[in-house]
């Protein structure tokens, strides 16, 4: 645990912080696949958490890409727009 001013910051070990391998040392492909699967699982779990939080809000929220195409809309936006999320996505 580190102390930054009055706040305490807890560092969590992450698979993203892999130890640097010695030059020329081969890395087992199975290890890489397991690490990739762990990172993917952590990402999907985090995404579900934040989508659940956003879906619980009554205000309408939508997210669009750089071309203004909607790729996320919450339940509040469904209620405001009067259409399902599936109809909002892609517009």
Image (cartoon, rainbow, N blue to C red):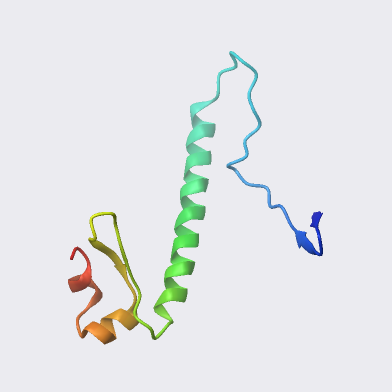
- Residue at the image point whose x is 19% and y is 81% from the top: 83
The count of marks equals 0
Would residue 81 be found to the left or right of residue 1 on screen? left
- Where residue 89 sits, quadrant-wise, is bottom left
Is 86 in front, or is 27?
Answer: 86
Would residue 83 be found to the left or right of residue 46 on screen? left
- Residue at the image point whose x is 71% and y is 52% from the top: 11
Residue projecting furthest to the top: 24
- Residue at the image point whose x is 51% and y is 33% from the top: 32
Screen quadrant of the C terminus? bottom left
Relative to 17, residue 89 above or below: below
Relative to 85, residue 59 above or below: below
Percent position (x, y) of residue 24?
A: 58, 13
Percent position (x, y) of residue 73?
A: 31, 72
Is 4 in front, or is 33?
Answer: 4
- Residue at the image point whose x is 34% and y is 80% from the top: 60
Would residue 2 be found to the left or right of residue 90 on screen? right
Screen quadrant of the N terminus? bottom right
Relative to 78, residue 30 above or below: above
Percent position (x, y) of residue 21?
A: 63, 23
Would residue 58 be found to the left or right of residue 46 on screen? left
Percent position (x, y) of residue 40?
A: 46, 49
């Amino acid at each position: 645990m580190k102390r930054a001013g009055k706040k305490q910051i807890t560092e969590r070990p992450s698979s993203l912080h892999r130890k640097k391998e010695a030059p020329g040392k081969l890395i087992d492909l199975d290890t890489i696949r397991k690490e990739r699967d762990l990172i993917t699982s952590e990402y999907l779990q985090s995404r579900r958490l934040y989508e659940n939080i956003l879906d619980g809000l009554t205000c309408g929220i939508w997210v669009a890409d750089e071309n203004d195409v909607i790729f996320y809309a919450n339940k509040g936006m469904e209620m405001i727009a009067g259409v399902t999320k599936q109809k909002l996505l892609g517009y």
